[in-house]
Amino acid sequence: MTSSDLKAYVGIIERMKGLILLPEFEQTFASLTAGLPKSKQFLLKMELKRLAQPCNYFIDLRGHVDGEVKPFQYLDKTHYLDDTARQIFESGVQAYGLYTLGVYEDVMNADNNYRVRHRKETEARIRNTLENLRRGPTLPEESSSQSNELIEQTEQANPNKFVQFGNYISRSEERMNFGIEVEVRQGESRYPALTSDLSISGCKLKVPSDKVVRDGEIINLALKGLEKEFTLNLPEGLNYQVVGQEIQDKYAYWRLKRIDPELHPKFNHFLQSFINGNKRRYKVNLDNTTDAVITKGYEQYYLPRINSLPVYLNITEGQVTSRFGLTSDYNKGIWHYFLDEQQQSVLSQVLSARRLKALISLKVNERTDILYSFTHAAKGKLYFYAALASELETEPTLKSMFFGFGAGKPSWRIFHLNLLKTNISHSQSEFALPGSNSVQQTSPLLRGMLEDIHYIVALTEVGANEYRYCYTAHPYDSTQLAALNKFGLSKVLPRTSCEAIPIHYVNLRAESRYLYKTTVLLRNKSDSEPIAAFSRDFSAGGLQLETTQAVNLQKGDVILLDLPDLQKITTKHQLQRLPYEIMAVSKSRTIMNLKVAKTDHHEGKLFFQQLIQSNRNKLTVAEETPKYPGLSDALRNMYLKTLTNFAIFVHRKGLRHDISVLGQGAQPNPLHSLLLLAQEPGSGLNFELLTKAHALNYELANQLKQMKRQDPPKAYELYIRVSQVAGQQQLSSYFNFEFENAEDLKVFALDALEHHTLFAFRFFLTRTGKLDSDYIAKELGYISVYAIHKAKSLEEELWHVEGVADGVEISAELVNRYSPERSRQQQQQRQAVLAKLTD
């Protein structure tokens, strides 16, 4: 940054930018600085030379500016800039002729940068303070309301928290942090209290913790504080209903909803005017909006990385069919596993009405089972065999045969199956900013597609090759294998259509793609005949091609491309025999996604970089259009509001990695319950049972250092043993990576199953990409209006998420793995442990 002693000459610096290397520099500089001392001329010339130095700094403005940040490619670097920064960058490069230190500083000091704003606000406060001191003391405004205590809810010292997915609290109006004296009239009781926030239709009340009230109870408030200053004409006070309460230290906070506010229109008008006139002074309450930002932000990290496959079940006239599967990059393996030789889904047969009825008969929190499956290929057809653990439990002979024979096949899979109740009302997002009507409504088209979906089955693959030997050890009579046909899926029954719907989230490509059609000649060898093709879109690092005929090429092949039409517009670059690597080939084998092959100097990449740089305003960005607009969002909303998985978020803070946030659905996972059970009375939420003296933090940190965003997940298992010691429950945790070998783990498990109660969980760690900030842009913008520091803090928390782990309970599978005869006993013991939380 230009030093303060040269600030007075910023006009000269701006005028001379980019001229330092031109012949006319000395003459122009001399004319502009003729009246300056030689020392100043020397300093200015040194400053101009400094600003013109080439720069290699990487610019990442994510979370640092008030604008939408997108990838921006310049030469071999991808920067992350908003529109303002991009314009400054491009103008600077044009002025200097290259990326220089001056360009970097101009970008970093743009007016919408939070750091610059903070500095300017600080300078303004200092100037105002000095001006007030110069003027001398002044009399304060005559307003007793100003002396009222403003109640700020401080953050808990313990940062650990659960984030409940799909749970947002909307307010129809703005609520102001404002403390006024009130008199609470509860039956015959009268006692003073204080509001902490206030709106037309509700408020939050601070009362001594010894005051007791029931949720739903009606109380009356006399607004004594306002009546001292204004004539309210409310002799009978206002009626409120208690909708919630919480205890903090010596006080209780009651959330109140006003009863029949339309009966007092004059007071409503007064209060609305009072809030509008004072909200800058007393601050708008942002609690529900900040909670929504946090919840939605963590959802956007979690959903694209789910390892469970949600399957949406249609129920019409007693018939059950699988309608949709919500796919991510990490659960596609499950989807493809259940496709037959004709690429048709068999999930409707696996998730049959008979199995659904059996699960519905259980309690809501017990509708889980283990699904075992394998396939057999014969005469060009693929035959599926699937059985639930509950079905095998009634037939021990078939169970041993199914395990022993099925586990010996490469197609052997084990899935955790969870039945979740849903309905169409879950399909829409229910959050709206205060004072707006922006709640997303499900369209009539989507309602017709979703109205018969009443259940979701979440399938999570929980088997692992290292534990397969536990199943292959089961003995069976090979002459009786025909008995397993009982669990085979019929080839006679007609297939029902089950569609894969990808989760819609931010495009994580490193660079934008642009629609452009041009002739391409393709060769798989330098001396082979060219194949005619044309481009569908391009970026600096890749192309999508469509050939006129099917090609016998596959992922990983390196091909050579000629671009004859584009060659006509450039003589600087030779666009023949350009090496590209195939990343994907369509089923029709006519469409291919390509990326530039690794080489020291790739003419195609350099050409397209220059083409994009010079024609950015003329090119059309390629955007993928979903088959059913809005369906992906509707399905994800339905899943979020019902899921029972847990999510672990790993934050990186400098060199340290922390686990302080766990995600949960509408129903807590047993892991959430065990963490609460292990919590000391009166203390904050403690994750020691999960992190185990930071052992998990270190393990996940080491793994994340080696992972890339697109890498497959790394699986871990957590075991929590519950023992009875002197009549008290004692909980201890263990990870599979703590055992030296599989035999040590088996010894531990057998002992725990015999003498204690054992819970087991399997979770899948993935490295995160960037946050889809568009999803929370409106909420952050609203918060920034009233508290830019709070918006900045929220962004900082979310941008530091480096890893996400999606997890399920596998206690039932663990028992079947090591000691199946104890299955029922362990299930009863686990239920008894969890019941302690409701006692």
Image (spheres, rainbow, N blue to C red):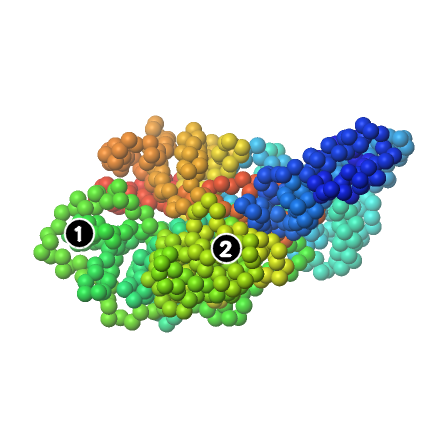
Name the image quarter holding the C terminus.
top left
- Label 1 or label 2, whichever comes before in sequence order: 1
Q: Residue at x 53, y 70 (%)?
A: 444
| Label of residue 594 in the image | none
Q: Residue furthest right?
A: 135
Q: Label 1: few (<14), some or many (≥20) within 10 Å?
A: many
Front residue of this view, candidates 192 and 622: 622
Between 264 and 188, the residue placed more toward the observer is 264
Q: Distance of mark 1 from mark 2, alpha carbons?
A: 60 Å
Residue at image location 24% in from the left, 71% down from the top: 492
Crowding at dot 2, Cα within 10 Å, few <14 / some 14-19 / many 20+, comes out as: some
Q: Where is residue 471 drawn, in percent x and y?
A: 21, 46
> In the picture, residue 207 is in which quadrant?
top right
Secondary structure of the residue carrying tag 2 is loop
Q: Is residue 43 left or right of residue 215?
A: right
**Disc 2 residue type (three-letter):** Gln
Residue 552 position (above or below residue 755): below
Which residue is identified by label 2? Answer: 574
Q: Is residue 600 left or right of residue 5?
A: left
**Observer-nearest of 97 and 497:** 97
Snapshot quadrant of residue 228 = top right
Q: Position of residue 183 (x, y in %)?
A: 72, 43
The spot of residue 468 in percent (x, y) is 23, 45
Q: Nearer the viewer, residue 296 or 714?
A: 714
Q: Quadrant of the N terminus?
A: top right
Q: Is 209 situated left or right of 510 in this image? A: right
Amino acid type indicated by mark 1: Phe
> Residue, x 83% and y 39% (percent of image)?
32
Residue 413 image position (x, y, % from top left): 27, 51
Q: Which residue is mark 1?
A: 405
Q: In the structure shown, which secondary structural element does the residue marked by tag 1 occupy?
A: helix
